[in-house]
Amino acid sequence: MQLLNNIRASFAESTPQRKLLVIGMVGGTAVLILVLILAFGSTGSKHIKNEYVDPGTGETVSDPAGKVAETEGATTQQKPIVFLGFSKLTDRGLSKVQHDKIKEVLQTYSDTSNAEITELSLATSSITITPPQIGSPNNETVVTGTLTANRKTTYALELHYDSITTIQVILKKDGAVVYDSTPLDLLQNNTPVGD
């Protein structure tokens, strides 16, 4: 408080030229800050074309003009699929190896069918996990969820596994199975379980 009083007293005793200089510096600094905010502060989402919030995941997706497709980890010559919401599978107990294999299997489905999937959204609120039943000889966990391909086609996803190193991906459309990976042993070069 004393410092503020000292500044006021010093300013009151200043000459008119010094007062104008101080006022000019403060005003100039304010104008410069305003110009910088206008020039660099408005590079936000309203300037990015093709941006939307995915309804299944709540994630913001942007695809600016001229952007090169992301191909990291792609195992295909086709355009890789943009996967939305799939990280929630590892949050719910699937292993990273299973997670990666699920995405690879879905990419294979897209490449070998006429689906031409470029974006696949897993509705995070639709993910359900059915653990193995006590006393059942089958030690299988089943994960289900709803997928939306290219923002319009809906699929039902079923994941079956009995350990963190196996996975079976089943994709259904209108109740009919359109793709079944069969159970895969992820430690044995992805061979079908039992071979």
Image (cartoon, grey):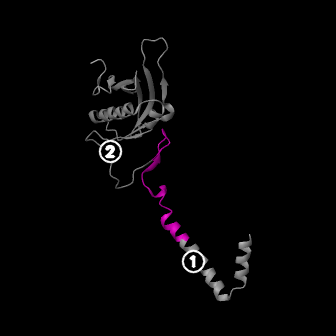
Q: Nearer the viewer, residue 63 or 3?
A: 3
Residue displayed at 43% across by 17% down: 139
Q: Residue lying furthest front in this view?
A: 2
User: Which quarter of the picture shows residue 149?
Assistant: top left
Evaluate if marks 2 and 1 touch, with contact meaning CB atoms under 8 Å apart: no
Q: Is residue 98 above or below residue 22?
A: above
Q: Toward which corner of the image does residue 190 lie, by quadrant?
A: top left
- Tell me if residue 40 is in the magenta stretch: yes
Magenta-colored span: 33-60
* Left or right, residue 76 beside residue 147: left
Name the mark on residue 28: 1
Residue type, numbered disc 2: Glu
Q: Is residue 138 magenta?
A: no
**What residue is shown at x 49% (from left), y 57% (from top)?**
44
Residue at the (42%, 14%) spot, across then down: 138
Q: Is disc 1 placed on a helix, strand or loop?
A: helix
For marks 2 and 1, give the CA distance. 48 Å
Of the numbered discs 2 and 1, the one sitting upstream in the chain is 1
In the image, residue 134 lies at what x, y percent?
49, 14
- Residue 2 horizontal/vertical position (percent): 74, 72
Is the N terminus in the top left, top right, bottom left or bottom right quadrant? bottom right
Count neighbours of disc 1 (C-alpha within 10 A) and say few if under 14, some if 14 to 19, many if 20 or more.
few
Tell me the residue that label 2 is attached to.
72
Element carrying mark 2: loop
> Type of residue at label 1?
Gly
Q: Residues within 10 Å of mark 2 (few under 14, many from 20)?
A: few
Q: Position of residue 17 (x, y in %)?
A: 64, 88
Tell me the quarter of the image containing the C terminus.
top left
